[in-house]
């Protein structure tokens, strides 16, 4: 059982759903480990990279924008004093971009102890990738699946390699297999939430597939935070009656100087560093 697990309130929760107090059980002395964090240039990803770098790990952050990435890299290095923080520029919204990112990572590092699939997408309107895949499905589901497979040699080269898929939206909900790419209509925030539920289901399948390779896969729900993505939420992204709640949501996700993102990132930091997860796979951690 994971550290700090509270099972009193789980009731009928499935066996793969675990609630964790994320503030505890962080492991120092991570200097021998390499952690890759997609979308690590801002929001929860940035705060995750910052916290893990403070523990001494070799941290590789990825992002689409080089200027933003280099600025984040400099801030992390200055604040932590860790000179083993690197940036790899890459775009996970396309298959070509995912494969290019994987190639760049494999050239840069021989082994990867932890892959944190943190990059996410929340759109205001229906948008397709360069190969015609709905963008929420492309970034939030396809990218973690394909990148995990693409860098599998490096994960296998590590001792007890692990994949952490960062989810969002609502807690585990039903998946509509006939609506994976908004076939029944784009519903903004609901389309985003459904893609995250799909990510969670995909992660369970990925865990079974990679278990024979000695690599674990788990899902972390960090809670909600004010980030650039949540700040981009507009009335057009809200279905029906939820448009009336827009002012409330704007207040809820108001800029807070990174405080909520820092709090949310503690789940990723725990997941990436805790030895309690060495042999745990196929679990959803509500942190």
Image (cartoon, helix red, strand yellow):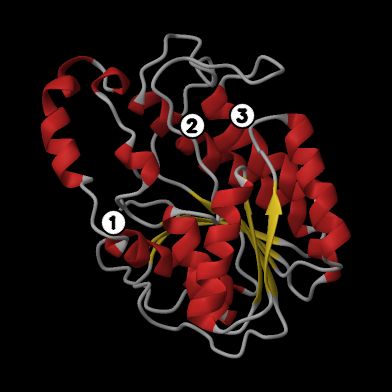
Residue 257 image offset from top left, x and y in percent? 28, 60
Q: CA distance from mark 2 to mark 3?
A: 9 Å
Q: Nearer the viewer, mark 2 or mark 3?
A: 3
Q: Nearer the viewer, mark 1 or mark 2?
A: 2
The residue at the point 60 percent across, 58 percent down is: 70
Residue 233 image offset from top left, x and y in percent? 30, 32
Q: Which mark is residue 195?
A: 2
Q: Nearer the viewer, residue 146 or 219?
A: 146
The residue beneath circle 3 is: 138
- Number of residues whose C-alpha sits closer than 10 Å to that of mark 2, classed few (under 14), some (14–19) or many (20 or more): many
- Number of residues whose C-alpha sits closer than 10 Å to that of mark 1, classed few (under 14), some (14–19) or many (20 or more): few
Query: Label 1's element?
Result: loop
The residue beneath circle 1 is: 11
Classify residue 88 as left or right of residue 179.
right
Identify the residue at the far top of this view.
Answer: 184
Query: Label 2's element?
Result: helix
């Amino acid at each position: 059982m994971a550290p700090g697990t509270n099972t009193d309130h789980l009731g009928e929760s499935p066996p793969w759903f675990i609630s964790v107090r994320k503030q505890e059980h962080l492991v120092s002395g991570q200097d021998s480990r390499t952690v890759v964090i997609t979308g690590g240039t801002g929001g929860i990803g940035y705060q995750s990279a910052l916290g893990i770098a403070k523990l001494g790990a070799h941290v590789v952050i990825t992002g689409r924008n080089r200027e933003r990435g280099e600025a984040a890299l400099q801030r992390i290095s200055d604040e932590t004093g860790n000179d083993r923080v690197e940036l790899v520029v890459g775009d996970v919204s396309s298959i070509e971009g995912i494969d290019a990112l994987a190639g760049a990572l494999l050239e840069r590092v021989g082994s990867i102890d932890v892959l944190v699939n943190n990059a996410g997408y929340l759109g205001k309107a229906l948008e397709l990738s360069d190969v015609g895949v709905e963008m929420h499905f492309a970034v939030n589901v396809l990218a973690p699946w394909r990148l995990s497979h693409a860098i599998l040699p490096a994960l296998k080269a590590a001792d007890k390699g692990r994949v952490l898929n960062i989810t969002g939206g609502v807690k585990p909900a039903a998946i509509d297999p006939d609506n994976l790419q908004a076939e029944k209509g784009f519903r903004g925030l609901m389309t985003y939430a459904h893609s995250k539920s799909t990510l969670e289901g995909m992660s369970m399948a990925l865990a079974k597939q990679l278990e024979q390779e000695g690599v674990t896969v788990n899902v972390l729900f960090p809670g909600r935070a004010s980030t650039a993505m949540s700040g981009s939420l507009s009335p057009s992204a809200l279905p029906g009656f939820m448009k009336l709640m827009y002012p409330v949501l704007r207040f809820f996700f108001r800029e807070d100087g990174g405080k909520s993102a820092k709090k949310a990132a503690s789940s990723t930091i725990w997941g990436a560093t805790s030895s309690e997860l060495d042999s745990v796979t196929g679990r959803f951690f509500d942190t």
